[in-house]
Amino acid sequence: MTESVHQDPIQQAAADWFARMQGNPALEDWTAFQAWLEADPEHAAAYQAVEAVWLDLEELPANDTASDPVVQAPDVVPLRRQVTPPKRGLLIGLGVAAAAAIVALVAAPRLAPPAFTDYATGRGETREVALADGSRLTLGGATTLRVHLGAKQRDVTLVDGEASFDVAHLEDRPFVVTAGERQVRVLGTEFNILNHAGSLAVSVRRGLVSVSGGAEGAVRLARGQQLAQAPGAAAKVRDVTPDTAFAWKSGKLIYDRTPLTRVAADLNRYVATPIRVDPSAASVTVSGVLLVDEEAAMIRRLELFAPIVAETTRGAVILKAARH
């Protein structure tokens, strides 16, 4: 008599997605996978369980293959080293169908380790991303980042733009964000990073982060602290109101005596027409709250906050110092 096995449909889907996302999936596959992950918190948890089994496989010693008579695959092409499918206890805990998908992955020839996943937004667009480890990211306008959840470390590269990070605490898998030459290393916290047009700002809302890669060495930031570096200048650590750094998520850009060039760089991630600062306004600073709105309205508000006038030319908006 054969005992029937009922596979949890979410576990089955998680295993199917894991198998599907290895190698070089198409863009539509990534989009569908992201939608599935964000549809239900149980989806991310199930996917993380499948991923955990795979990561366990990578950590098994080379001689484990010969020690388990249940699985013998003489033609298996090893990954970094010889591995074996999960032990019987792992198979039962994960579910038969999910385990079968993992075994199939182990036996697949020339299987490449999971690559980085790219996420991007257009000008004026924001996007929330739920990662399989439980972390949540929010991308600001014109932002590009890459994610790889590895066995011993979770890596993100903020290629350009601004993003906030609410990182799930995993003691043995630190979360490292690379932004230019800097690395921000955490175990679990909430922070924001701007990396655009040569400017860098790392702001902490909760927990602790360590920022390395600069001339000053590793810098620890706690809640309410920010490491900021303007193009060509030394980095400075200062106290900030945490909500100010995260205000862009609610459609607000908050400035306090901020150089106009920095403000223009920010706005260029939200508007279609490039904004440039005329040399006559290079020393102007801006204080106030700009609502992320229709392009012309944002420019009008900026003229109210600073002694400038905006001139529209073919293909650009030029910010010049106002004449008295």
Image (cartoon, grey):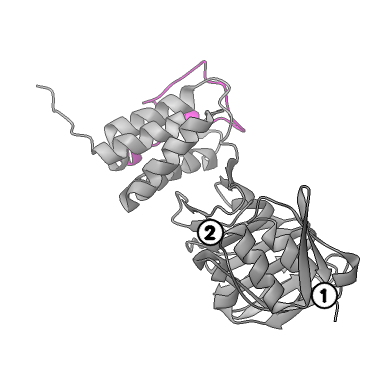
Q: Tell me: residue 228, above or below residue 134.
A: below
Residue depicted at x 39% and y 45%: 37
Q: Quadrant of residue 286?
A: bottom right
Report x, y in % for residue 240: 64, 81
Q: Residue furthest top?
A: 75
Asked if the magenta segment contains residue 225, the reply would be no
> Magenta stretch mostly in which secondary structure?
loop
Q: Residue furthest left?
A: 1
Q: Which residue is mark 1?
A: 322
- Amino acid type for the residue under numbered disc 2: Asp
| Residue stretch in magenta | 65-90
How dense is the environment of label 2, judged by Cα within 10 Å: few (below 14), some, or many (20 and up)? few
Front position in the image: 90 or 278: 278
Residue depicted at x 85% and y 77%: 323
Report x, y in % for residue 99: 35, 33
Picture disc at residue 172: 2
Q: Residue furthest front?
A: 324
- State how far apart marks 1 and 2 are (Cα): 56 Å
Front position in the image: 132 or 56: 132
Task: Report whether residue 278 is seen.
Answer: yes
Q: Secondary structure at mark 2?
A: loop
Residue depicted at x 37% and y 35%: 15
Question: As drawn, is 289 to the left or to the right of 8?
Answer: right
Front position in the image: 283 or 132: 283
Question: As drawn, is 90 to the left or to the right of 107?
Answer: left
- Amino acid type for the residue under numbered disc 1: Ala
Report x, y in % for residue 134: 43, 56
Quarter containing the N terminus:
top left
Q: Tell me: residue 300, above or below residue 12.
A: below
